[in-house]
Each structure stands twice: as C-alpha cells, then as structure tokens.
Image: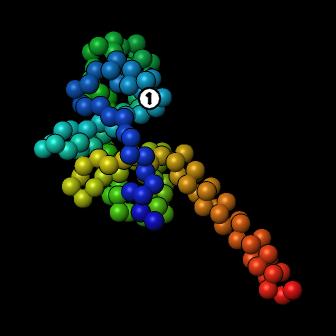
Amino acid sequence: MSIGEFCNREVVFATRKSSISEAAQLMRQYHVGDLVVVDEIEGRRVPVGMVTDRDIVIEIIAKSLPVTDFTVGEIMGPQLISVQESEGVLETIRLMRASGIRRIPVINQDGGLVGIMSVDDMLDLLAEELAALAKVAPREQAREARTRE
C-alpha cells in the first residue's frame, strides 16, 4: 500500500510571505493546527516547510511580539521532512517516528505537493485494517462449520 493512496489530498497551505494573521485565519477556517508552506514553482506547489499553531504561540505570542512583524516563512519549522507518494505506509510510519513528527507532506516525483498524512490519519487507517483482520477468524469458523455438516 502506498501512502499516496491514503493521504488527505485536501491540503491547507500558505506561502512564505503569508502573514501570521492569514495563517491563523486559515487554521481556524479549516479546523487544522498546521499549514504546509509552499513555493509556487512552474505551476506546482512545492512544500518548503510547515507552520503550526504551536509555532505561532511559542515564537510570537509567548514572547509578546506583534504578529504583524512576522511572516509564515520567518517562523516555519527549519527543516521539512516529506515523503514520496509511492512510499509504503509502514515506511512512512517509520520515518514519522524517527523524525518525531505528527504530520508529513506527501509529494510526487516532481516534488509537488499531493497530500498530507497525519498520525490521526494513520491511526484511522490501521484501525480499519485491524478491524478487517479481526473478522477473519469468525468467517473461517463459519466456513468450516458449513463444509463439515
């Protein structure tokens, strides 16, 4: 299973030049705690960073700095970790765990943004798979009972 099959393709994003207020409004409007920061390159949205509600609080609000003095690009995380859409689910989980990240942008071969995957998305996916697996034993027992009558 490739991560591209399961990622959320409706990604809320901002640019480096977006204001902090614009970012916060997007987070509120779409009920998300993070935005993928992108550069527009030849018609593609190329992820260059992430900004979270926590970044806004820690970097600006907790320091009592004026939000109007900063852009998203100035407070976004320093290093972006992303995953190719062809990568497997388990490999993506390992990468997220090793990197200590809860959300990961999913990109295509050209580096363009195609989706995002979160820990919550992974838990939903794995819960569905485990629920399907749990139904195997009762079905096997029913099949055996029918064939042995």
Q: Name the secondary structure under disc 1.
A: helix
Q: Position of residue 24 (x, y in %)?
A: 39, 22
What is the quadrant of the C terminus in the image?
bottom right
**Viewer-proximal residue among 36 and 143:** 143
The answer to whether 30 is drawn above or below residue 127 in the figure is above
What is the quadrant of the N terminus in the image?
bottom left
| Residue drawn 42% across the image and 58% down it | 5
**Viewer-proximal residue among 26 and 33:** 26
Q: Residue furthest left?
A: 42
Q: Which residue is mark 1?
A: 30
Q: Position of residue 17 (x, y in %)?
A: 22, 26
Q: Position of residue 75 (x, y in %)?
A: 32, 29
Asked whether the viewer can see residue 137, the reply is no
Residue 92, quarter of the rendered image: bottom left
The answer to whether 111 is drawn above or below residue 12 in the figure is below
Q: Residues within 10 Å of mark 1 (few under 14, many from 20)?
A: few
Amino acid type, residue under disc 1 in the picture: Tyr
Q: Position of residue 132 (x, y in %)?
A: 65, 63
**Viewer-proximal residue among 146 and 75:** 146
Q: Residue furthest bottom?
A: 148
* 3 lies left or right of 71: right
Residue 127, quarter of the rendered image: bottom right
| Residue drawn 34% across the image and 38% down it | 36
**Viewer-proximal residue among 95 and 139:** 139
Colour scheme used in the picture?
Answer: rainbow
